[in-house]
Image: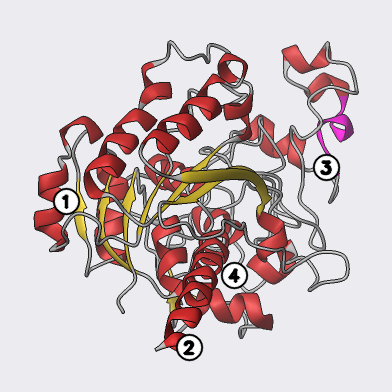
Amino acid sequence: MTLTAIDLFCGAGGLSAGLELAGFKVLAGADLFEAAGKTFEKTHKHAKFIGEPIEDVTVERLMEDTGLRKGELTVLAGGPPCQAYSIYNHQRGMHDSRAVLFKQYLRIVDGMQPEWIVMENVMGIYSIGGGEAVRSIKSELKKLGYEVEEKVLKAEEYGVPQERRRVVFIGNRIGAPIRHPAPTHGPGLKPFTTIKEAIGDLPALENGEDGGTVNYAKPAKGPFQEFVRGSQKMVENHDAPRLGKVNIERLKHIPPGGSWRDIPHDLLPAGMQRAKRSDHTKRYGRMTWDGLSCTVLTKCDIHWGAYIHPEQDRAVSVREAARLQAFPDSFVFQGSKTDQYIQVGNAVPPLLGRAIGRTILEIINEQAEPKIASE
């Protein structure tokens, strides 16, 4: 039996990559972000990419592109744009047009009738409209015949070297039990993947240096580096953003694990000179080799969080951000450097996607066992 998936709002294809690692075949992805679409096409050559507004993506076209008929799709996955739900968007609310894009996802659920659905979003979805978005998703899916449960998953508990919280909805219309993946990393389990294990084999960079296509600095060490490197002999997208002279001067004062509090007062940005020392805890943060990354956002901006390399006086490169998201090095991100950071920050970490896919596959196999035994 071929296990199939379609990924709506697919971006560069992080969730698609995870599902494929779990054994699913992704047949199509849809997204309006042109640079992300080019990345998806290069990394999912067997899948059809549809670069149109979700409102224009018809069920008929999806069926034509994938060769599937209604009810034959195993998983319809997708993460409607999260900006309307994010705590970083202070104007968020159900009035934001992006907050109702999940209704387009529901339209395609209704038309395709997949056996399973997977939706992912940021924690802010719980508070928007007093929980209106979550209630709407679950009630609308129930009307379509789907039982759905959502849970907050921590990416670091699945081998991702990053503290990242995401709300994941899993549901089905076939009467199967619903489970979210059990953690594989943490106390009593495998140790968390550290930043050194994630990026320690990458060559050194100067501030603003475009590494181009380069050799690895060291042999792969440990299961994470072996996973992300795969059969790759060279690494791409190892490009660091260029920080201005004053920021480089600030970085010289910040030790591993330090932050803006370590910068001399007269060197701080004017707004931060008035800040309480309890404020902006991650700003101008320098990573530590033995720790986890803070949440990778769409800009690894040192003003926003702890995106300073543990040893080198620069911000993390696109490739380092991708490693912290657990992207295989075979993903070569397309578009401008800004576009590349956006693709990385918006993605579902592939290892988290793999854990979700494996759990669904386990349930599918459990459901098949009684049928096999009775035949």
Residue 82 belongs to magenta span: no
**Between tags 2 and 1, which lies in front?**
2
Tag 4 near tag 3, CB within 8 Å: no
Residue stretch rendered in magenta on the structure: 258-264
Mark-to-mark CA distance, 2 and 3 = 63 Å
Indicate the amino acid at tag 3.
Answer: Ile
**Residue underneath mark 4:** 202
**Residue underneath mark 2:** 373
Q: Mark 2 or mark 1: name the one nearer the start of the chain.
A: 1
**Residue underneath mark 3:** 254
Query: What numbered label is drawn on residue 62?
Result: 1
Q: Mark 2 or mark 4: name the one nearer the start of the chain.
A: 4
* Vertical arrangement, residue 101 with respect to residue 148, above or below: above
Q: Nearer the viewer, residue 116 or 161?
A: 116
Mark-to-mark CA distance, 3 and 1 = 51 Å
Residue 262 belongs to magenta span: yes
Indicate the amino acid at tag 4.
Answer: Leu
Residue visible at 76% across and 51% down in the picture: 287
